[in-house]
Image (cartoon, grey):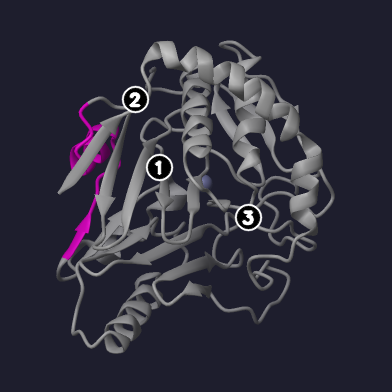
Amino acid sequence: MSLSHPILPHSARFVFRAALAALALVASSGAVAAEQDKPPLFAPWIDGTSASEPETQVQQVDPDTFVIRQSMRTNFEGPFLYLLFGSDKALLLDSGAGGLEIRPTIDRLIAAWCARNGRTSIPLVVAHSHGHGDHHQGDAEFAARPDTTVIGLAPTDVAGFFGITDWPREIATFDLGGRALSIVPTPGHEPAHIAIYDPKTRFLLSGDTLYPGRLYVPANWSGVFRESMLRLAQFVREHRVSHLLGAHIEMTTTPGQDYPFEAPAHPDERVLELPPEAAYALARLVEGMGDTVQRTVADDFIVFPVEARLPNP
Ligand SMILES: [Zn+2]
Protein backbone atom coordinates (compact mmCIF):
# COMPACT_ATOMS: atom_id res chain seq x y z
CA MET A 1 0.00 0.00 0.00
CA SER A 2 1.36 3.40 -0.82
CA LEU A 3 0.01 6.85 -0.16
CA SER A 4 1.04 9.88 -2.10
CA HIS A 5 0.77 13.61 -2.02
CA PRO A 6 1.41 16.18 -4.73
CA ILE A 7 4.33 18.55 -4.36
CA LEU A 8 3.71 22.27 -4.26
CA PRO A 9 1.66 23.76 -7.11
CA HIS A 10 3.39 25.77 -9.81
CA SER A 11 2.77 29.13 -8.15
CA ALA A 12 4.59 27.97 -5.05
CA ARG A 13 7.58 26.96 -7.13
CA PHE A 14 8.44 30.58 -7.90
CA VAL A 15 8.45 31.37 -4.21
CA PHE A 16 10.65 28.36 -3.73
CA ARG A 17 13.05 29.48 -6.46
CA ALA A 18 13.55 32.79 -4.70
CA ALA A 19 14.20 30.96 -1.46
CA LEU A 20 16.56 28.63 -3.27
CA ALA A 21 18.63 31.55 -4.50
CA ALA A 22 19.08 32.74 -0.93
CA LEU A 23 19.87 29.26 0.33
CA ALA A 24 22.42 28.66 -2.40
CA LEU A 25 24.44 31.60 -1.14
CA VAL A 26 24.53 30.05 2.32
CA ALA A 27 25.18 26.63 0.85
CA SER A 28 28.16 27.56 -1.26
CA SER A 29 31.43 25.71 -1.02
CA GLY A 30 32.07 26.94 2.53
CA ALA A 31 29.26 24.83 3.96
CA VAL A 32 30.27 21.87 1.85
CA ALA A 33 33.89 22.23 2.89
CA ALA A 34 32.82 22.41 6.53
CA GLU A 35 31.06 19.07 6.06
CA GLN A 36 34.39 17.53 5.07
CA ASP A 37 35.78 18.55 8.46
CA LYS A 38 33.11 16.55 10.31
CA PRO A 39 33.89 13.01 11.40
CA PRO A 40 33.12 10.62 8.55
CA LEU A 41 29.84 8.74 8.70
CA PHE A 42 31.51 5.46 7.77
CA ALA A 43 34.76 3.61 8.30
CA PRO A 44 36.96 3.70 5.19
CA TRP A 45 35.36 1.87 2.30
CA ILE A 46 37.07 -0.82 0.26
CA ASP A 47 38.53 1.09 -2.68
CA GLY A 48 40.14 -1.47 -4.97
CA THR A 49 43.64 -0.77 -3.69
CA SER A 50 44.00 -4.10 -1.88
CA ALA A 51 44.20 -7.40 -3.76
CA SER A 52 42.75 -9.12 -0.71
CA GLU A 53 39.69 -6.93 -0.23
CA PRO A 54 36.37 -8.79 0.00
CA GLU A 55 33.80 -8.74 -2.82
CA THR A 56 31.41 -6.77 -0.63
CA GLN A 57 31.81 -4.57 2.43
CA VAL A 58 28.87 -4.04 4.75
CA GLN A 59 28.60 -1.14 7.17
CA GLN A 60 25.77 -1.09 9.69
CA VAL A 61 24.31 2.33 10.41
CA ASP A 62 21.80 1.05 12.98
CA PRO A 63 20.26 -2.40 13.61
CA ASP A 64 17.82 -1.86 10.70
CA THR A 65 20.06 -0.07 8.17
CA PHE A 66 22.95 -1.42 6.14
CA VAL A 67 25.11 0.08 3.41
CA ILE A 68 26.91 -2.34 1.13
CA ARG A 69 29.72 -1.53 -1.25
CA GLN A 70 30.56 -3.81 -4.14
CA SER A 71 34.32 -4.11 -4.62
CA MET A 72 35.80 -2.28 -7.59
CA ARG A 73 37.76 -5.48 -8.14
CA THR A 74 34.49 -7.14 -9.17
CA ASN A 75 33.37 -4.15 -11.28
CA PHE A 76 35.04 -0.75 -11.66
CA GLU A 77 31.76 1.00 -10.86
CA GLY A 78 32.03 -0.08 -7.22
CA PRO A 79 28.38 0.79 -6.52
CA PHE A 80 26.75 1.24 -3.13
CA LEU A 81 23.59 -0.70 -2.21
CA TYR A 82 21.23 0.03 0.67
CA LEU A 83 19.25 -2.45 2.77
CA LEU A 84 16.55 -1.03 5.04
CA PHE A 85 14.32 -3.01 7.41
CA GLY A 86 10.89 -2.09 8.73
CA SER A 87 8.56 -4.23 10.84
CA ASP A 88 6.66 -5.47 7.75
CA LYS A 89 9.23 -5.68 4.99
CA ALA A 90 12.77 -5.00 3.89
CA LEU A 91 13.89 -2.91 0.94
CA LEU A 92 17.06 -3.45 -1.07
CA LEU A 93 17.97 -0.46 -3.21
CA ASP A 94 19.93 -1.74 -6.23
CA SER A 95 21.37 -5.18 -6.84
CA GLY A 96 24.87 -4.37 -8.02
CA ALA A 97 26.93 -4.12 -11.20
CA GLY A 98 27.59 -7.82 -11.74
CA GLY A 99 30.93 -9.60 -11.53
CA LEU A 100 29.93 -11.28 -8.28
CA GLU A 101 27.04 -13.04 -6.58
CA ILE A 102 25.40 -10.35 -4.52
CA ARG A 103 22.54 -12.35 -3.01
CA PRO A 104 24.60 -14.29 -0.44
CA THR A 105 25.58 -10.99 1.24
CA ILE A 106 21.96 -9.82 1.31
CA ASP A 107 20.62 -13.19 2.47
CA ARG A 108 23.17 -13.26 5.29
CA LEU A 109 22.10 -9.80 6.49
CA ILE A 110 18.41 -10.69 6.30
CA ALA A 111 18.93 -13.97 8.16
CA ALA A 112 20.88 -12.21 10.92
CA TRP A 113 18.20 -9.50 11.18
CA CYS A 114 15.44 -12.10 11.40
CA ALA A 115 17.34 -14.02 14.09
CA ARG A 116 17.81 -10.84 16.13
CA ASN A 117 14.13 -10.01 15.78
CA GLY A 118 12.77 -13.49 16.54
CA ARG A 119 11.42 -14.07 13.06
CA THR A 120 11.90 -16.70 10.41
CA SER A 121 11.48 -14.42 7.39
CA ILE A 122 10.56 -10.96 6.14
CA PRO A 123 9.25 -10.01 2.69
CA LEU A 124 11.89 -8.36 0.51
CA VAL A 125 11.38 -5.67 -2.13
CA VAL A 126 14.22 -5.09 -4.60
CA ALA A 127 14.00 -1.54 -5.95
CA HIS A 128 16.41 0.41 -8.13
CA SER A 129 17.76 3.92 -7.98
CA HIS A 130 17.44 3.75 -11.78
CA GLY A 131 17.60 1.36 -14.69
CA HIS A 132 21.26 1.51 -15.72
CA GLY A 133 23.13 -1.78 -15.87
CA ASP A 134 25.44 -1.13 -12.94
CA HIS A 135 22.47 -1.10 -10.55
CA HIS A 136 20.42 -4.17 -11.44
CA GLN A 137 22.78 -6.96 -12.50
CA GLY A 138 21.90 -8.95 -9.39
CA ASP A 139 18.16 -8.96 -10.12
CA ALA A 140 18.20 -12.46 -11.63
CA GLU A 141 19.56 -13.84 -8.35
CA PHE A 142 16.44 -12.55 -6.59
CA ALA A 143 13.90 -13.56 -9.26
CA ALA A 144 13.01 -16.91 -7.70
CA ARG A 145 13.70 -15.92 -4.10
CA PRO A 146 10.70 -16.67 -1.85
CA ASP A 147 8.60 -13.74 -0.64
CA THR A 148 10.53 -11.33 -2.87
CA THR A 149 9.33 -8.65 -5.30
CA VAL A 150 11.76 -7.28 -7.88
CA ILE A 151 10.48 -3.99 -9.28
CA GLY A 152 10.87 -3.49 -13.04
CA LEU A 153 13.16 -0.92 -14.61
CA ALA A 154 10.82 1.29 -16.68
CA PRO A 155 9.28 4.48 -15.28
CA THR A 156 5.84 2.84 -15.60
CA ASP A 157 7.04 -0.12 -13.50
CA VAL A 158 8.39 2.17 -10.79
CA ALA A 159 5.37 4.49 -10.80
CA GLY A 160 2.99 1.51 -10.81
CA PHE A 161 4.65 -0.23 -7.88
CA PHE A 162 4.78 2.87 -5.69
CA GLY A 163 1.30 4.07 -6.73
CA ILE A 164 2.53 7.24 -8.44
CA THR A 165 -0.14 8.47 -10.87
CA ASP A 166 1.50 11.79 -11.76
CA TRP A 167 5.09 10.79 -12.56
CA PRO A 168 7.47 12.59 -12.02
CA ARG A 169 5.73 15.37 -10.11
CA GLU A 170 4.22 13.27 -7.35
CA ILE A 171 6.08 12.08 -4.27
CA ALA A 172 4.89 8.73 -2.91
CA THR A 173 5.10 7.15 0.51
CA PHE A 174 6.20 3.53 0.86
CA ASP A 175 5.93 2.21 4.40
CA LEU A 176 8.19 -0.68 5.43
CA GLY A 177 6.31 -0.88 8.73
CA GLY A 178 7.04 1.94 11.15
CA ARG A 179 9.38 3.35 8.51
CA ALA A 180 7.54 5.40 5.90
CA LEU A 181 9.95 6.10 3.05
CA SER A 182 9.36 8.94 0.59
CA ILE A 183 9.87 8.08 -3.07
CA VAL A 184 10.96 11.16 -5.03
CA PRO A 185 10.96 10.79 -8.83
CA THR A 186 14.19 12.28 -10.20
CA PRO A 187 14.39 11.41 -13.92
CA GLY A 188 17.14 13.05 -15.94
CA HIS A 189 20.29 10.96 -15.56
CA GLU A 190 17.95 8.11 -16.53
CA PRO A 191 14.17 8.11 -17.14
CA ALA A 192 13.18 5.91 -14.16
CA HIS A 193 15.45 7.47 -11.54
CA ILE A 194 14.15 7.89 -7.98
CA ALA A 195 15.59 9.23 -4.75
CA ILE A 196 14.44 7.69 -1.46
CA TYR A 197 14.15 9.53 1.84
CA ASP A 198 14.29 7.53 5.06
CA PRO A 199 12.90 9.41 8.09
CA LYS A 200 14.57 6.96 10.50
CA THR A 201 18.15 7.80 9.51
CA ARG A 202 17.21 11.05 7.71
CA PHE A 203 19.28 9.84 4.78
CA LEU A 204 18.27 10.85 1.28
CA LEU A 205 19.44 8.07 -1.03
CA SER A 206 20.20 9.97 -4.21
CA GLY A 207 21.49 7.28 -6.59
CA ASP A 208 23.34 8.60 -9.63
CA THR A 209 21.46 11.91 -9.56
CA LEU A 210 23.69 13.42 -6.88
CA TYR A 211 26.80 11.73 -5.55
CA PRO A 212 30.47 12.67 -5.22
CA GLY A 213 31.34 12.04 -8.85
CA ARG A 214 30.40 12.71 -12.46
CA LEU A 215 26.70 13.48 -12.73
CA TYR A 216 25.97 12.36 -16.30
CA VAL A 217 23.07 14.14 -17.99
CA PRO A 218 22.06 13.22 -21.57
CA ALA A 219 21.64 16.41 -23.63
CA ASN A 220 17.98 15.73 -24.45
CA TRP A 221 17.16 15.19 -20.76
CA SER A 222 18.65 18.47 -19.51
CA GLY A 223 15.29 20.13 -18.88
CA VAL A 224 13.91 17.08 -17.08
CA PHE A 225 17.07 16.85 -14.98
CA ARG A 226 16.74 20.51 -14.01
CA GLU A 227 13.13 20.03 -12.90
CA SER A 228 14.15 16.96 -10.92
CA MET A 229 16.90 18.88 -9.16
CA LEU A 230 14.46 21.62 -8.25
CA ARG A 231 12.06 18.96 -6.93
CA LEU A 232 14.85 17.34 -4.93
CA ALA A 233 16.07 20.65 -3.47
CA GLN A 234 12.52 21.55 -2.51
CA PHE A 235 12.14 18.17 -0.82
CA VAL A 236 15.36 18.71 1.14
CA ARG A 237 14.14 22.13 2.22
CA GLU A 238 10.92 20.63 3.60
CA HIS A 239 12.44 17.63 5.40
CA ARG A 240 15.12 16.97 7.95
CA VAL A 241 17.86 15.45 5.83
CA SER A 242 21.13 14.50 7.55
CA HIS A 243 23.11 13.33 4.52
CA LEU A 244 22.76 12.61 0.84
CA LEU A 245 24.04 9.13 0.04
CA GLY A 246 24.52 8.26 -3.62
CA ALA A 247 25.42 5.14 -5.54
CA HIS A 248 29.10 5.75 -6.38
CA ILE A 249 32.20 7.73 -5.45
CA GLU A 250 34.32 9.16 -8.28
CA MET A 251 35.90 12.14 -6.51
CA THR A 252 39.24 12.13 -4.76
CA THR A 253 39.88 13.91 -1.48
CA THR A 254 41.14 16.85 -3.58
CA PRO A 255 38.17 19.19 -4.22
CA GLY A 256 37.02 19.12 -7.85
CA GLN A 257 39.37 16.26 -8.76
CA ASP A 258 37.83 13.02 -10.06
CA TYR A 259 39.44 9.70 -10.97
CA PRO A 260 40.05 8.70 -14.60
CA PHE A 261 37.17 6.88 -16.31
CA GLU A 262 36.96 3.23 -15.30
CA ALA A 263 39.78 3.60 -12.80
CA PRO A 264 40.33 0.16 -11.23
CA ALA A 265 41.10 1.58 -7.78
CA HIS A 266 40.41 4.77 -5.85
CA PRO A 267 43.31 5.66 -3.57
CA ASP A 268 42.48 8.72 -1.40
CA GLU A 269 38.80 8.50 -2.15
CA ARG A 270 36.38 11.19 -0.99
CA VAL A 271 33.80 10.12 1.60
CA LEU A 272 30.43 8.88 0.32
CA GLU A 273 28.18 11.29 2.18
CA LEU A 274 27.25 14.73 0.90
CA PRO A 275 25.67 17.45 3.05
CA PRO A 276 22.01 18.28 2.32
CA GLU A 277 23.16 21.69 1.07
CA ALA A 278 24.67 19.94 -1.95
CA ALA A 279 21.11 19.57 -3.28
CA TYR A 280 20.69 23.36 -3.18
CA ALA A 281 24.07 23.90 -4.79
CA LEU A 282 23.26 21.52 -7.67
CA ALA A 283 19.75 22.93 -8.18
CA ARG A 284 21.18 26.43 -8.29
CA LEU A 285 23.79 25.38 -10.85
CA VAL A 286 21.42 23.64 -13.23
CA GLU A 287 18.69 26.22 -12.89
CA GLY A 288 21.07 28.78 -14.38
CA MET A 289 21.81 26.49 -17.35
CA GLY A 290 18.38 26.55 -18.98
CA ASP A 291 17.75 23.52 -21.18
CA THR A 292 21.43 22.92 -21.94
CA VAL A 293 23.42 21.39 -19.11
CA GLN A 294 27.03 22.56 -19.15
CA ARG A 295 30.03 20.79 -17.74
CA THR A 296 30.67 22.33 -14.34
CA VAL A 297 33.24 21.28 -11.79
CA ALA A 298 32.25 21.81 -8.16
CA ASP A 299 34.25 20.73 -5.13
CA ASP A 300 32.17 17.62 -4.51
CA PHE A 301 30.71 16.70 -7.90
CA ILE A 302 30.99 17.38 -11.62
CA VAL A 303 27.93 18.14 -13.74
CA PHE A 304 28.71 16.17 -16.87
CA PRO A 305 26.59 16.47 -20.03
CA VAL A 306 26.72 13.51 -22.43
CA GLU A 307 25.25 12.88 -25.89
CA ALA A 308 21.49 12.68 -26.28
CA ARG A 309 20.12 9.24 -25.48
CA LEU A 310 16.89 7.51 -26.36
CA PRO A 311 14.21 7.56 -25.23
CA ASN A 312 13.41 11.23 -25.54
CA PRO A 313 11.52 12.67 -22.60
ZN1 LIG B 1 25.61 4.09 -11.75
Determine whether 292 is above or below 188 in the image.
above
Lateral position of residue 244 relative to residue 152, left or right: right
Residue at 80 percent across and 62 percent down: it is 268
> Considering only order in the chain, which callout, 2 or 1, is on the residue closer to the N terminus?
1
* Label 3 element class: loop
Give the amino acid type for the residue marked by disc 3 in the picture.
Glu
Residue carrying label 1:
130
Give the amino acid type for the residue marked by disc 2 in the picture.
Arg
Horizontal and vertical percent position of residue 48: 68, 68
Lateral position of residue 186 relative to residue 285, left or right: left
* Label 1 element class: loop
* Label 2 element class: loop
Tell me if I can see residue 38 in this picture.
yes
Judge: label 1 CB < 8 Å from ligand 1.
yes
Horizontal and vertical percent position of residue 185: 37, 34
| Magenta stretch holds residue 153 | yes
Lateral position of residue 2 relative to residue 131, left or right: left
Instruction: Estimate the spatial distance between the alpha carbons at disc 3 and disc 1, rounded to whole Å.
Output: 19 Å
Give the magenta part as a residue range.
Answer: 148-165
Which mark, by number, is residue 244? none
Judge: label 3 CB < 8 Å from ligand 1.
no
> Considering only order in the chain, which callout, 3 or 2, is on the residue closer to the N terminus?
2
Picture quadrant of residue 276 = top right
Residue carrying label 3:
273
Lateral position of residue 18 relative to residue 126, left or right: right
Determine whether 184 is above or below 135 in the image.
above
Which mark, by number, is residue 169? 2
Tell me if I can see residue 308 in this picture.
no
> Considering only order in the chain, which callout, 1 or 3, is on the residue closer to the N terminus?
1
Q: How many marks?
A: 3
Q: Nearer the viewer, residue 307 or 42?
A: 42
